[in-house]
Image: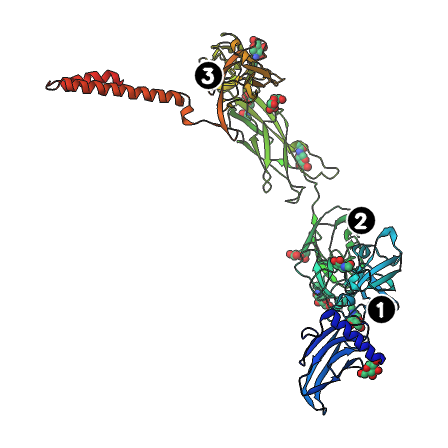
Amino acid sequence: MTKQAQLHCFCLLTLYLTTGYGQEGKFSGPLKPMTFSIFEGQEPSQLIFQFKANPPAVTFKLMGETDGIFQIQPDGLLYHNKTLDRETRAVHRLQVSALDAQGNTVEGPVPVTIEVKDINDNRPVFLQQHYEGSVRQNSRPGRPFMYVNATDLDDPATLNGQLIYQILMQLPKVNDVMYFQINNQTGGISLTPQGSQELDPLKNPSYRLVVSVEDMGGLNEHSFSDSAPVVITVKENIWKAPEPVEIEENLTQPYPIKITQVQWNDPGALYSLVGKENTPRFPFSIDQEGDIYVTQPLDREEKDEYVFYAVARDEQGKLLSKPLEIQVKVKDINDNPPTCPSPVTVLEVQENEQIGSSIGTLIAHDMDEENTVNSVLEYRIVDQTPKVPRDGLFLVHTYHGTIQLVVQSLHKRDAPQYNLTVEVSNEDFKTLCFVQINVIDINDQIPIFEKSDYGNLTFPEDTAVGSVILTIQATDADEPHTGSSKILYRITQGDSEGRLEIETDPQTNTGYVKLKKPLDFETVAIHNIVVQAENPEPLVPGVQYNASSSATFRLTVTDVNEAPQFSQQVFEATVSEAVAKGTKVGNVTATDPEGLDVSYSLRGDKRGWLRINPVTGEIFSAAPLDREAESLYRVQVVATEVGGSSLSSTAQFHLTLTDVNDNAPRLVKEYTGLFFCYPLKAPGSLIFEATDDDQPTFRGQHFTFSLGSESLQKDWEVSKINGTHAHLSTKHTSFEERVYNIPIRISDSGRQPMEGTVSLPVTFCKCVENRCFQPAAHMPGIPPVGMAVGILLATLLVIGIILAVVFFRMKRDKGQHNAESAQASEVKPLRN
Ligand SMILES: *[C@@H]1O[C@H](CO)[C@@H](O)[C@H](O)[C@H]1NC(C)=O
Ligand SMILES: *[C@@H]1O[C@H](CO)[C@@H](O)[C@H](O)[C@H]1NC(C)=O
Ligand SMILES: *[C@@H]1O[C@H](CO)[C@@H](O)[C@H](O)[C@H]1NC(C)=O
Ligand SMILES: *[C@@H]1O[C@H](CO)[C@@H](O)[C@H](O)[C@H]1NC(C)=O
Ligand SMILES: *[C@@H]1O[C@H](CO)[C@@H](O)[C@H](O)[C@H]1NC(C)=O
Ligand SMILES: *[C@@H]1O[C@H](CO)[C@@H](O)[C@H](O)[C@H]1NC(C)=O
Ligand SMILES: *[C@@H]1O[C@H](CO)[C@@H](O)[C@H](O)[C@H]1NC(C)=O
Ligand SMILES: *[C@@H]1O[C@H](CO)[C@@H](O)[C@H](O)[C@H]1NC(C)=O
Ligand SMILES: *[C@@H]1O[C@H](CO)[C@@H](O)[C@H](O)[C@H]1NC(C)=O
């Protein structure tokens, strides 16, 4: 036998022995299209199938992608004589025909497909020996900046070809922190969150990784792996705020004008600008290159600085990083003319002013930036009208704007007024401002009264305050409406109490003497008044006020009957509320200006507590006082003239009552809801609070508590918590289901303690959810169920007896006519 034949025999034998190959079925059958799956890498000479031929077919023929591997025996046994390799050919498409003795095809050809199943016979291999990449500082974590890639010839649909990437090593690795991560499926390398924050090219410009790739999904111990080094360069983050920008205002170039730029680390970012503050105008834009433009002329005088943010987003609109602050300063140009302080600046100069005197200052203004050449102003006089007695009488300081007299003193008779035109200029602009200078008279005339004595005046003492009692007049020959001619009147004698004042009419210098305070006959009956007239401006040297500048009048005050006057409007007194009836509690005094006697009385004594001595003004208690009713008792006292016209006046009397301990303590409220759950499981306690209507002492209230009855001590206990609160506790648990009224004695801590006994109702009741549950039958006054049933039975019994008696009577009285009345008289008493 040839080796081949031996092989066939051996294999066939094996097949027959192990699988029952002789019969039709899994491994043999007629010629028909078939598909077989065979693992690659197996021993050669494996049987695949035994085709059975039907006459006249005697032999078989194999065609197609046999690759010198597949063979068919004349008897129809299909086998492969070489190891299959999926990576060479994954599917072999064969055709099998059945031939007759003459070699003619009698059946087929039918397709027979051999699928080669993968085994893990290939290592994954990185496509590159080593990798290099770079990453920007602060790049977004998790976003791959490079890929490593490996291939494995094995079927990617099976685990054999499923690759898992890993980082084996990162060098350097500070504090054991990984800055890089790899997507185990795609091989994409990205930064970890720490890497995104901490990577810094200045600290460490490059990192070395070792990445590995493993097949079998990394799950199998028979997996293959490969590794490769990766060198990563860290590059500086270029997403940085640019330097502040300065732009000149009102630029004339065509807009938009590029002023600065920003750039995201990778291409493709979407840029936008966001204002920091809400401004009506936002004259900036950004394009998709990150270039920032100003879109309109700026005006420093409107806004001299802009701050806004440049924002970079990814395609999904997510912020790539922190917005950058952009600062734009607007540079001044000289685009504003000087402005005059007012259309005409009016100044005054006195006739006799000396050469060099400063007359006043012209202060023009410039809107351009201060302390720059753009806002520096220069002053120059360009015209003087009139030019008498000559031109150039005035000088203006070039920078200060101060105007001075330069040639001579002015005389009003030469010209009462000069108009100056002052040119105010900065670098590029000139403005004309107008100054009017008035030459004013000097104060060389004194006021002269029209008469020196205004005679005798008589006014009653009750003349109203504000009344004009006299009109006076002085005149001044100086220039009208100046401080040299204006007159102020001053009273120099006869009014030490300041009862008078004098107002001057600014037009006519007429003086009106008015009452400022009431006159008082009893104090001063006759005033000898001296009035002095003066100018607000000082007189020139050599001129003085003389007797013609003053005048006199005599004011006589006449008496008027006036009401008595109290020494004060409110009298106050304090007494203890416990003072005995008739105790003096205070006194008031009033005097009559005319010296008449005064009689006192009270008004508004609504509680009738007080009495006043009509002669002395002493006030006495007239009844028991009670602080708890009125702590501050207010009444009016009336003082009436005795005789005369019986004028009267009133004042207040306030009596403060101080507390004495005259109230027993009481419970702070009506305690209706205190209860214990019945049956009581364990002794319990309740809290209650006491109060007192007396004024608490400065230490607060201090009550003592005790049971009101000795006999209760076996069931109850009262214990103080603090000055106002106490516990009521049960001493045992056997209480009945009812209301107990517990008398409690409470004493206060006054110097003479007051004691009160109160009753604290405590209910023992069945509880539902810790709330007192009281069925209707258990309400106080309604008997409990057992008793109620008893009453019902008794009632029925009584009714029964009545009925029995009635029937008996009816039977017995049959025929009797007064049956009804007898029945009624029997029933009535029983029913009640
Ligand atoms: C396998 O069969 C082919 C014919 O299909 C033949 O050429 C080849 O030599 C055979 N190989 C072996 C190892 O028997
Ligand atoms: C890896 O390489 C294979 C073959 O070259 C290619 O098909 C695949 O797209 C690559 N994968 C990546 C993530 O580059
Ligand atoms: C691959 O990565 C995913 C997601 O990060 C993870 O759930 C999975 O366990 C990883 N597989 C292996 C084999 O490490
Ligand atoms: C800008 O300049 C033009 C002339 O250059 C001027 O007419 C205009 O008033 C200026 N605008 C502002 C706001 O200064
Ligand atoms: C000065 O100018 C004012 C107007 O501003 C005018 O009324 C007045 O007459 C002028 N005075 C002189 C002396 O020219
Ligand atoms: C004013 O009264 C006084 C005294 O009563 C008297 O001497 C004087 O002459 C009177 N003056 C006038 C102007 O009546
Ligand atoms: C006061 O002075 C003026 C001139 O200033 C003079 O006319 C008048 O007579 C003087 N009066 C007295 C009382 O001296
Ligand atoms: C009350 O009378 C006394 C003397 O009787 C006196 O000193 C005191 O000033 C009077 N008080 C008032 C308010 O009039
Ligand atoms: C007294 O005790 C009660 C109950 O504990 C408490 O509510 C209250 O504030 C206390 N009072 C004072 C003044 O401590």
Q: Residue furthest bottom?
A: 102
Callout 3: few (<14), some (14-19), or many (20+) C-alpha neighbours within 10 Å?
some
Q: Would residue 777 be found to the left or right of residue 572 on screen?
A: left
In the rendered structure, which amino acid carries the disc numbered 1? Val
Callout 1: few (<14), some (14-19), or many (20+) C-alpha neighbours within 10 Å?
many
Callout 2: few (<14), some (14-19), or many (20+) C-alpha neighbours within 10 Å?
some
Q: Would residue 731 be found to the left or right of residue 203 on screen?
A: left
In the rendered structure, which amino acid carries the disc numbered 3? Asp
Q: Which residue is mark 1?
A: 125
| Figure quadrant of residue 705 | top right
Kindly tell me whether residue 62 is visible in this rendering. yes
Q: Which residue is mark 3?
A: 605
Q: Would residue 545 be found to the left or right of residue 796 on screen?
A: right
* Viewer-side label of 2, 3: 3
Q: Quadrant of the C terminus?
A: top left
Q: Quadrant of the N terminus?
A: bottom right
